[in-house]
Image (cartoon, rainbow, N blue to C red):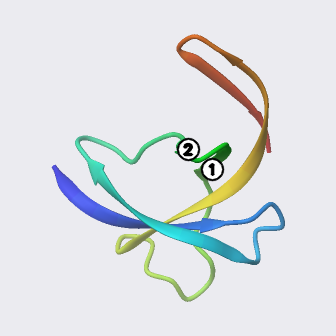
Amino acid sequence: MRAARAILFGLDRRVIVGAVRVVIADEAPAVILLGADAFVPMPAPPGWDAKAVLAYGQVLPFRADENRLEVVS
């Protein structure tokens, strides 16, 4: 297990809307939920060290069932 910083980008993938610390057991989380907003992995911006910082882009959820979250990216 290790801790990593995840930078959260808005819908346009240009504006940083927040940063969170995540704990990774085997692999990075597939979805980060912050309040009512969902964020999914995206490529690291140019010049960023992808191993040091994880990048996540905001998406609009369109369906949420028990144990399932579908998003529009």
Q: Which residue is at a point 62% across and 78% down the rendered structure image?
A: 45
Mark seen at residue 62: none
Q: Which residue is at a point 55% across and 44% down the rendered structure image?
A: 33
Q: Amino acid at mark 2?
A: Leu
Which label's residue is closer to the chain start, 1 or 2? 2
Instruction: State yes or no: discs 1 and 2 in contact (Cβ < 8 Å).
Output: yes
Instruction: Label 2: state its secondary structure.
Output: strand
Q: Is residue 67 above or below residue 24?
A: above
Q: Is residue 45 left or right of residue 3?
A: right
Q: Amino acid at mark 1?
A: Phe
Q: List the residue tagged with mark 2.
A: 33
Q: Is residue 35 above or below residue 18?
A: above
Residue 47 in which image quadrant? bottom right
Percent x, y of residue 11: 80, 60
Q: Residue furthest front?
A: 35
Q: Which residue is at a point 60% across and 47% down the rendered structure image?
A: 35
Percent x, y of residue 31: 54, 41
Mark seen at residue 39: 1
Q: Which residue is at a point 64% across and 25% down the rendered structure image?
A: 69
Q: What number of labels is visible? A: 2
Residue 73 in which image quadrant? top right
Closer-to-camera residue (51/29): 29
Percent x, y of residue 44: 57, 71
Closer-to-camera residue (30/58): 58
Circle 2 packing at 10 Å, graded few (<14), some (14-19), many (20+), is few
Closer-to-camera residue (49/37): 37
Circle 1 packing at 10 Å, graded few (<14), some (14-19), many (20+), is many
User: How far apart are the alpha carbons under marks 1 and 2?
Assistant: 6 Å
Q: Report the mark closest to the observer, 1 or 2.
A: 2
